């Protein structure tokens, strides 16, 4: 077998292995997100918790930005936000610099419930990395940062 063919086959095997590992990570992450959403409020759809998580991580924003950032259509975001408002997890405010706009943010109840729900998720996540050395963790972070960078667009 030629060197280039061997390298190509070897590279293909590596890429397949990477795909399997990424799929395992995504699947496990999704299952954990669904469990965390249920811990937050078992009556909500997991998509509603995605909105909660986004607001918790990034702060007040418009419904348009929420829709774009969560890859949901505007009508779904609107319906979910309305439900979250009725449950007092989310509130609307008029931004001081634009009286026509509306900013969505978490209420104190929404923040507290999010923190409580995420504790379980974090404990499971940290259990996975607890035996790693600092250098292994640094390497993993650097590789993920490179993988997630937008430089390859």
Image: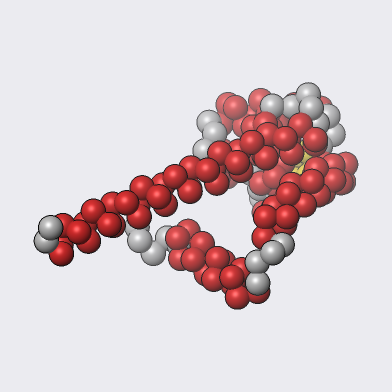
Which quadrant would residue 126 be assigned to in this image?
bottom right
Q: Is residue 131 above or below residue 20?
A: below
Q: Is residue 3 above or below residue 15?
A: below
- In this rendering, does residue 66 appear at all? no
Q: Residue furthest bottom?
A: 135
- In this rendering, does residue 132 appear at all? yes
The image shows residue 79 at horizontal and vertical percentages of 66, 25
Looking at the picture, tell me which residue is in the foreground, 29 or 69: 29
Q: Quadrant of the N terminus?
A: bottom left
Residue occupying image coordinates x 61% and y 43%: 29
Residue occupying image coordinates x 79% and y 27%: 42
Q: Residue furthest front?
A: 1
Q: Quadrant of the C terminus?
A: bottom left
Residue occupying image coordinates x 60% and y 41%: 28
Q: Is residue 43 above or below residue 53?
A: above
Answer left or right for 111 relative to 19. right
Answer left or right for 16 relative to 127. left
Looking at the picture, tell me which residue is in the foreground, 64 or 18: 18
The image shows residue 146 at horizontal and vertical percentages of 46, 65
What colour scheme has been applied to the protein in the rendered image?
Answer: secondary structure
The image shows residue 10 at horizontal and vertical percentages of 27, 57
Looking at the picture, tell me which residue is in the foreground, 6 or 141: 6
Q: Is residue 23 above or below residue 123?
A: above
Answer left or right for 66 relative to 144. right
């Amino acid at each position: 077998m030629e060197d280039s063919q061997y390298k190509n086959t070897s590279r293909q095997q590596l890429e397949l292995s990477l795909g399997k590992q990424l799929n395992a990570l995504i699947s496990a992450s999704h299952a954990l997100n669904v469990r965390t959403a249920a811990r937050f409020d078992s009556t909500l759809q997991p998509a509603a918790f995605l909105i909660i998580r986004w607001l918790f991580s990034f702060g007040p924003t418009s419904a348009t930005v929420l829709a774009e950032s969560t890859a949901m259509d505007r009508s779904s975001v609107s319906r979910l936000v309305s439900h979250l408002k009725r449950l007092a997890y989310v509130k609307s405010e008029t931004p001081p610099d634009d009286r026509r706009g509306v900013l969505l943010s978490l209420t104190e109840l929404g923040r507290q419930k999010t923190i409580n729900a995420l504790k379980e998720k974090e404990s499971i996540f940290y259990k996975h990395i607890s035996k790693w050395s600092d250098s292994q963790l640094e390497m993993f972070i650097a590789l993920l940062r490179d993988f997630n960078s937008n430089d390859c667009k």
